Image (cartoon, rainbow, N blue to C red):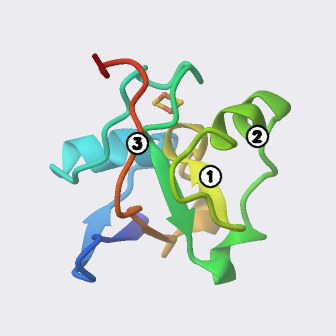
Amino acid sequence: MPKMTFIKPGGERVEVEAPLGLSVLEIAHRNNIDLEGACEGSLACSTCHVIVDPEWYDVLEGASEDEEDMLDLAFGLTHTSRLGCQIKMTDELDGLTVSLPQATRNMMVEK
Ligand code: FES
């Protein structure tokens, strides 16, 4: 079973099992990692924003235009930012490491 690592905002590293075909968002939820994903993967929010380890960024398939548009709205955008719901686990991604951003901006629940 492939594995991946989440780095929490405080710097704690959590290695978890990463079943093939699941998204980084789904893997986070299975492991009680605090990644929100307000729209459940339908590219309508940016709360599943993760910062991909630069070593891994180029291994990922490129972001779609819709993903890029949503990412533009993410808080604390970086050069290796992606939306966690759009990264699907494959054998090549065994060992993937992503950081959780310090904060997210959630337009869907803001009052
Ligand atoms: S969960 Fe909303 S875009 Fe990923």
Q: Amino acid at mark 3?
A: Leu
Q: Residue furthest front?
A: 111
Numbered circles on residues, count: 3
Confirm if mark 3 falls within 8 A of ligand 1: yes
Q: Is residue 74 above or below residue 4?
A: above
Query: In the image, what residue occupies the spot 50% across and 48% down?
Result: 49
Distance of label 2 from label 1 (alpha carbons):
8 Å
Residue 26 image position (x, y, % from top left): 36, 39
Which labelled disc corresponds to residue 48?
none
Residue carrying label 2: 68
Q: Amino acid at mark 2?
A: Glu
Q: Quadrant of residue 53?
A: bottom right
Marked residue nearer the N-terminal end (1 or 3): 3
Quarter of the image that includes the C terminus: top left
- Relative depth, front residue between 106 and 56: 106
Q: Residues within 10 Å of mark 1 (few under 14, many from 20)?
A: many
Viewer-side label of 2, 3: 2
Q: Is residue 14 above or below residue 76?
A: below
Query: In the image, what residue occupies the spot 42% across and 39% down?
Result: 105
Q: Is residue 84 left or right of residue 13?
A: right
Residue carrying label 1: 82
Distance of label 2 from label 3 (alpha carbons):
17 Å
Viewer-side label of 1, 3: 1
Q: For the residue labelled by badge 1, is the local secondary structure a helix, a strand or a loop?
A: strand
Residue carrying label 3: 25
Marked residue nearer the N-terminal end (2 or 1): 2
Query: In the image, what residue occupies the spot 40% across and 42% down?
Result: 25
Q: Is residue 65 left or right of residue 41?
A: right
Distance of label 1 from label 3 (alpha carbons):
11 Å
Q: Amino acid at mark 1?
A: Arg
Q: For the residue labelled by badge 3, is the local secondary structure a helix, a strand or a loop?
A: helix
